Amino acid sequence: MDNEILLDVQHLTHFFPITKKIAVKAVDDLSFQLRRGEIFGLVGESGSGKSTVARCVMNLYRPQAGRILYKGIDTCDRRAFRKNRRMLQTTRQLIFQDSASSLNQRMRVCDIIAEPMRIQHITPPRGTHRAEAAFQMHYVGLDPSFLDRYPPELSGGQRQRVAIARALAMEPELLVADEPIASLDVSIQAQIVNLFKHLQQEHGFSFLFIAHDLAMVEFLCDRVGVMYHGRLLEVAPTEELFQHPLHPYTKSLLSAIPIPDPVRERARKLIPYEEEPGAPRGTLREVSPDHFVAE
Amino acid sequence: MGALLEVKNLSVRFDARAGEVQAVRGVSFSLAAGEVLAVVGESGCGKSVLCKAIMKLLPPTARITSGSILVNGADITAYRERDMRRLRGKLFSMVFQDPMTSLNPTMTIGAQIGEAVRLHHPRLSRGELRSRVEELMTLVGIDRPRERMDLYPCHFSGGMRQRAVMAIALAGEPSILFADEPTTALDVTIQSQILDLLREVQQKLGTATVFVTHDLGVVARVADRVAVMYAGKIVETGTAEEIFYDPRHPYTWGLLQSLPALSRGRDTLRAIPGMPPSLENPPRGDAFACRNPYALAIDYEEEPPMFRLSDTHYAATWLLDPRAPEVIPPIGGGLHG
Ligand SMILES: Nc1ncnc2c1ncn2[C@@H]1O[C@H](COP(=O)(O)OP(=O)(O)OP(=O)(O)O)[C@@H](O)[C@H]1O
Ligand SMILES: Nc1ncnc2c1ncn2[C@@H]1O[C@H](COP(=O)(O)OP(=O)(O)O)[C@@H](O)[C@H]1O
Ligand SMILES: [Mg+2]
Ligand SMILES: [Mg+2]
């Protein structure tokens, strides 16, 4: 892994208007950097804004404030985006959290997987689009008999794997994966995680990996950022974060990791975390090399 | 005590364009009042279809081809939609995966819970309805219900939203709750709280629960009994202790070995090799045979019966036949001990 910065998120802020008067601050002045060839994990409370970050990074939302630099290009700038559109659309891919609703219900699996290649006029490396789709399906553990099915005829985990195959077919440099494996059984999770690791090590893919399963994050990620209420509270290399968590929310999160052992799991106690209302919003400070915590 | 729910030899097929899919193949299990049964297994092995078949929520392309479903001894297999509508909510209720999408963002939480209450008690006055909503919110652990009733889902954190979803599911005081991956979209702290809540509510109301999940940590926390499914069948069933400390089916071994906790310091995780079979043409014999390092010749010929290990523990693998060679399980006796 070199130290080139592939993705640089600076002071990202995004609101959602709910009614005329109320708005949700989904992401609030958030900054982090993803190095080339790195797997950066984003964890945190449900509703803390992880998916919103992913969608801003992929230009699906236009943030109200902040900049997102990808290979030095400000992707939120309309002109810069237009000029680099093809590069941005072919080298970045997103796996959605709810692939069930993000897949086109009226398309067959083989067409869903080949669609991005068709749109970008990419010649499939394995001859035909169908052969390419079949190859990618094999990678994610799906039988070729699924090629002619439609999404409503698949189980939740099968649909999720179609979404993963579709993103991988583009051989992206940056893969943003929003809870890609939560709906899969543990053996297939292991298979996909091994695949991600292989793609990082052998093909130099970079990942923004959003997940709840901290055991998987610990196994897969190089660095981890902990989010809470739209902000980053702690960022550190994975081992450092799991060994020496500093922020009380991180400690609470780590205490909540379920243990697959009935006796130990039932005895496990959660360290609760409540943010004091009106507490000052901390800024990230580097307390040891590469370990940042909000104070 | 008799079983609250008894499913016998249930099979479900889909007529898909590409051919016939045998999603559930001869599943039998029973559920006692107040019990939590966790259903785990390969993605696509038929867990969701099984739950939907019992609640009669299958799409029109699906058919129940054999078996029976008994509730309190009454056979409901042939019930029509009209009869089922009376049962749903009151006898059965369900919580699905995504709490973010199962609430309406433009309606207050109180109004949404109220709507569910009205479905079961159409004649309540406004005041009675409000107090019932308050009661349900208290039951699921939402503090200051009176103030929070008038808030919108966006004002609630993820955990609070899932509590609201639970309040809606519990509005009809169901005897059986189907929870299909209810905590998959939640972070671990909230998940822990919701699971403890589920246990508490279940003890208070005596609700029986069928809990579908992929998270074996969740299973360890909530389940009284576990059913492990593979390719449309239950291949092993037992108490949580029996499944975690004394698993007998090679597929169960494979699942437990895939956990990242067991691969600390290794470069790759131990996934089960190969792919699950297509349910269009399930293979002859044991469907797991081609991925099973312990497979015997007979596994490719004949389906194994359910072997009895204890009153609660059963497994369908030829390894338990007295003629089979002795195999030392690669796992069991506590994952960390
Ligand atoms: N409408 C349908 N038409 C055809 N086949 C279907 C349909 N719905 C489901 N299936 C098939 O039935 C099988 C069982 O599906 P089910 O949704 O029960 O899986 P599951 O065990 O819940 O999996 P997951 O863990 O991925 O949610 C799958 O192989 C799926 O492809
Ligand atoms: N399309 C939307 N409309 C309104 N509010 C939204 C929308 N998407 C997300 N939000 C809100 O923004 C916040 C962050 O959501 P999200 O990014 O989905 O969190 P996470 O992925 O961390 O669970 C939540 O409060 C959520 O309700
Ligand atoms: Mg999300
Ligand atoms: Mg399912």
Image (cartoon, coloured by chain):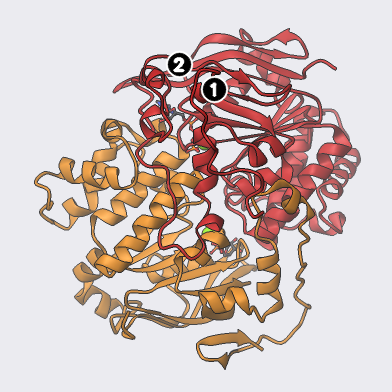
Whether label 2 lies within 8 Å of ligand 1 gets the answer no
Q: Sequence order check: which comes first, mark 1 or mark 2?
A: 2
Q: Which residue, given by chain and number where applicable, does mark 2 sit on? A: B303
**Pointers 1 and 2 in contact (C-beta within 8 Å):** yes
- Looking at the picture, does residue A176 appear above or below residue A29? above
- Looking at the picture, does residue A236 appear above or below residue A204? below
Residue B62 shows in this picture: no
Assign ligand 2 to one image quadrant. bottom right
Residue B126 vs residue B235: left or right?
right
Determine the secondary structure under disc 1.
Answer: loop
Image quadrant in which the N terminus of chain B is located: top right
Residue A99 shows in this picture: yes
Residue shown at 57% from the left, 9% from the top: B67
For badge 1, the amino acid type reads: Ala
Q: Position of residue A36 (x, y in %)?
A: 32, 77
C-alpha span from label 1 to label 2: 8 Å
Q: Which residue, given by chain and number where applicable, does mark 1 sit on? A: B316
- Looking at the picture, does residue B267 appear above or below residue A135? below
- Mark 1 on the same chain as mark 2: yes
Q: Position of residue A215 (x, y in %)?
A: 56, 61
Q: Position of residue A295 (x, y in %)?
A: 67, 89
Q: Colour of chain B?
A: red
